[in-house]
Image (cartoon, grey):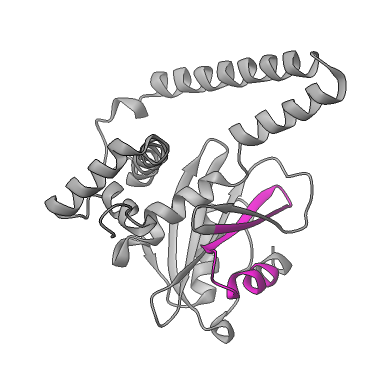
Amino acid sequence: MSALIPDEETLHAYVDGRLDAEAQARVEAFLARDGGWAATVADWKRDAERLRAAAAGPLLLPLNPRLDPAALRQGMRVRRQRRLATAAALLLVAGLGGGLGWTARERMFAAANPPMADAVSAYRVFATAGSQAVEVRATGTDAMQTWLARHLDRGGARVPDLTAYGVRLLGGRLLATEDGPAAMVLFEDEDGRRIAFYMRPGPPFATETIEERRDGGLLARYWSRHGYRFAVVAPADDDRAAEIARVLRVGS
């Protein structure tokens, strides 16, 4: 970390509570000066908290009031109300002026709902968590496929052997979404660099072709097929991820 501006890896370490006191103080001083990065880091913290709570499971959180059925129903009602409010705002914008209103509507919706944001958040929280990145260690592609089929309705996608691309199958982690269970499968190379294959149920995107979205230092390549959404998330400078995404899409 430089004397003035911490790098993104240091900021993630700050979110995860992995910095010593001196480094933490430097990051906090930087965030106090830079409101834009302060808001981004606050969003990361919220994502991390939500994903950790979702991954903890009912056996580890028996007294969590947020898991009470009444609280869950209330949360669903709040989310529906927010969607209705967003839809009303978009309709208002669309009615303000023909093509200009429609363009503004699309931009507002895209900004509020970046595609596969949960896949990127899952990578940030878990793929950087060292030996705790996965909850199920891989013993082979067949065993991982069986694990996927047990938790996802149609088993998501095939998990091929990717050793030809310099990565080995590390394992998987089950996650939760409002549309049902999701899974993240991690691959790792000899240098410890990781590529995540994320799959979840949900409405399809407008196209089945592979699209791309950059988020900080990460690049998500995503597509949808057969009632599932898929994404390959990796550092933006990892050139292998594009070909791996094409291989995984064929098997989805």
Is residue 184 visible in this depiction of the protein? yes
Q: How many marks?
A: 0
Residue shown at the point (28%, 36%) measured from the top left:
32
The quadrant of the rendering that contains the N terminus is bottom left
Front position in the image: 55 or 25: 25
Quadrant assignment, res 126: bottom left
* Vertical side of 134 occupied by 57: above or below: above
* Vertical side of 209 occupied by 58: above or below: above
- Of all residues shown, which one is farthest toward the front? 4
- Of all residues shown, which one is farthest toward the bottom? 164
The quadrant of the rendering that contains the C terminus is bottom right
Front position in the image: 144 or 243: 243
- Of all residues shown, which one is farthest toward the left? 21
Residue shown at the point (33%, 40%) measured from the top left:
58
Image position, residue 164 (x, y; %):
58, 86
Residue shown at the point (25%, 56%) measured from the top left:
3
Residue 226 appears left or right of 118: right
Q: Is residue 233 magenta?
A: yes
Is residue 155 visible in this depiction of the protein? no
- Of all residues shown, which one is farthest toward the right? 98
Front position in the image: 178 or 145: 178
Residue 189 appears left or right of 6: right
Quadrant assignment, res 190: bottom left
Q: Is residue 194 magenta?
A: no
Numbered range of the magenta stretch? 219-247
Image position, residue 175 (x, y; %):
45, 48
Image position, residue 64 (x, y; %):
28, 30
Residue 10 appears left or right of 158: left
